[in-house]
Image: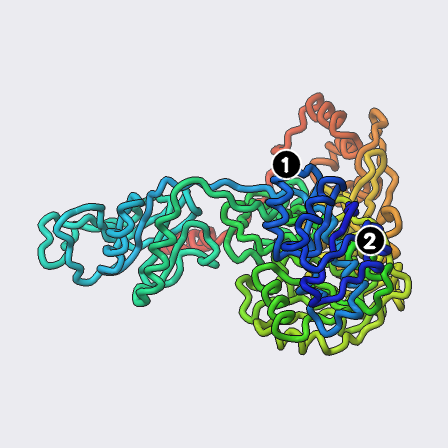
Amino acid sequence: MTAATTFLCSCEETMPLHGETVAKACRTKVRTADQLCRKELDFFKAVLAQEGDVLVACTQEAPLFTETAEDMGFAGRLAFANVREQAGWSTGAREAGPKTAALLAAASEEMPPIQAVTLESKGVALVYGRDEVAIEAARRLSETLDVTVLLTRPGAVTPPSATDFPVVKGTISVARGHLGAFELMVDDYALPSPASRRAYAWQTPRNGASSTSDIVIDLSGGMPLFPAAELRPGYLRADPRDPAAVERLIGEASGLVGTFDKPRFVQFDASLCAHSRSKITGCTRCLDLCPTGAITPDGDHVAIDPAICAGCGQCAAACPTGAAAYALPPVDALMRRMRALLTTYQAAGGTGAVLLLHDGDHGLPLIDMLARHGDGLPAHVLPLQVNEVTQVGPELLAGAFAYGVAGIAVLTRAKPKHDILGLQRTLATTRTILAALGYGADVLRLVETDDPDALAADLAVPFAGTPTAKPASFLPMGAKRGLLELSFLELHAAAPAPVDVIALEKGAPFGNAEVNVEACTLCLSCVSACPTGALSDNPDKPMLRFAESLCVQCGLCEQTCPEDAIDLVAQLDFVAWREPKKLVKEEEPFHCTQCNKAFGTRSTIERIASKLEGHWMFSGANAARREALFMCEDCRVERVVNESFDPYGAPERPRVRTAEDYLAEVKAGKDGLN
């Protein structure tokens, strides 16, 4: 949407406003102020009473403006944009008019609502530890939680004088689940003896005990029970030797009772998944990248547990079919915001745009510190906030260069909380494509820092590339795979030095399935295995067709082909992407000699007949049976039944002389001599 009115505030004259540039580029009525949140608040109220949707170029006082609008019963949409820290408080603020307009246009793009996953905890907690630290933590938590203590390989632990909560012994061997639904398997499980005196004495232990709980509090000091343990809802872990960490854990655990909502980060469509077919494993990209174990194989597809998913988005970025798609926000909504940012910047006269992709938890504070204590972001650097930078896929990067950016910087922590292997692979593949199309070899940059000055230094280094001279303006709509195809075609159309085919490293999600037509028998096993429809047949004629734009290089066709006639070639063929499905192989069908029904192919039937030439079942007195080889399945069955074919009626094979026969003959010879 384009706001009917946009408020620009100089924040007590600490930054320029660029009202004319904003009004022209954003096509909005601009209202200016110097202290809108205080002495000019009545001005804000007056406009709210008369105008439609309103955009305020301030995020610091968003709570005040929101409360004011609610008190007035404002029915329009009220949106906010951070212009001060991202453009106004900068040494380049005087030249930041196009950037200011771009930030406001991007903020005007409405994002869809967030879907939530509900987790419920009744407060049943397991405290897992080794010694008195675990028992003391359980004692303090027992006032708010239903606590059980599990001591793993305990030493001499003195039992309390009163049994206020259960204390047992055991070691967790398997842990699954999340807040409100943990399932644990415990080995060496034993109950304490009631007569324990100086230290716990344990009854006879056993393996394979099971337990369930809503919360797991790990004070064992050992290895975490889960991958990416700090991201598992309901699993709290602290070093028992660190009193401050234990104290923080107790405070956090005591509040984990009730109903909790977490975002649904990923939408998953199992029908698009290319994981497996007929027990043959194909694509495992998401399984290889998920840091929390939220993704597991589930038959022909995978399953994503939204309660465990921590939202890194690497599965969605890597998923070649679009089965896994990031939902916070959906990629089409994010790309529309990026489009508004870049196209408005250009319309306002901006040049040489560099897109800075960052998250809210780390990147946003770094940008704020740079604005408050440094030179701020340069006027040509346009920040775009995402939920997690690891959600960024090739469609977003390709779309940005098609829209005209000179470079992209992706800002991460010095020590990212998520493994960024998937992001690194995405950047590497996109770099290869951009370099081949003439955009430049150094136009995608990963900035791993927690220091705002280091960020500024990195952004000060020019991007050695060639932006497009004919920026695209396509409107991104639709699902992820369709957006990827559209973005890549627009990237090629806008390329400074376009080429038709780009070779990629093996494992890239684009490419060709080369078929050895001489070896191919048109059995069409590959068609039934292909999850995307890249390989297809013709129901009216023996035919194999291929659409390269749909191929995700999952390898299922290659592994399924009984003739080993398919080889995968990772590449990007823009000509093939624009063309309809190509004909790979076609043959005339063979017609049943009895009913004239088309079945199989002529070459296949003739090859089978040739191989069975001279076989006892179809030769000599049985030569007439050979006619059944040239009949369809229905006529063949009728012929077999009517003529009583006996598949076990083969002539008796000559007996093979064995070692036992030889020994028997030798023995018989010796007996004869006697």
Where is the C terminus found, in terms of image quarters? bottom left
What colour scheme governs how the chains and residues are painted in the rendered image of this protein?
rainbow
Image coordinates of residue 542 in percent, x first then y, are 83, 39
Residue matched to label 1:
650
Image coordinates of residue 568 in percent, x first then y, are 74, 58
Q: 434 or 320, which is in the foreground?
A: 434
Q: 115 or 350, which is in the foreground?
A: 350
Mark 2 surroundings within 10 Å by alpha-carbon count, few (fewer than 14), some (14 through 19), many (20 or more): many
The amino acid type, in three-letter code, at marker 1 is Ala
| Residue 259 in the figure: left or right of residue 381 | left
Mark 1 surroundings within 10 Å by alpha-carbon count, few (fewer than 14), some (14 through 19), many (20 or more): few
Placement of 270 over or under 646, stated as above or below: below
**Residue at x 64% of width, y 47% of height:** 327
Q: 660 or 422, which is in the foreground?
A: 422
**Residue at x 72% of width, y 40% of height:** 49
Image coordinates of residue 279 in percent, x first then y, are 59, 45
The amino acid type, in three-letter code, at marker 2 is Cys
- Mark 1 vs mark 2: which is more N-terminal? 2
Q: Secondary structure at mark 1?
A: loop
| Residue 580 in the figure: left or right of residue 202 | right
Q: Is there any visible trace of residue 426 in the rendered image?
A: no
**Residue at x 42% of width, y 48% of height:** 176
Placement of 536 over or under 458, stated as above or below: above
Where is the N terminus found, in terms of image quarters? top right
Q: Is there any visible trace of residue 145 in the rendered image?
A: yes
Residue matched to label 2:
26
Q: Secondary structure at mark 2?
A: helix
Image coordinates of residue 216 in percent, x first then y, are 36, 51
Q: In this figure, what is the number of numbered marks?
A: 2
Res 171 label: none
**Discs 1, 2 touching: Cβ within 8 Å:** no
Placement of 607 over or under 638, stated as above or below: below
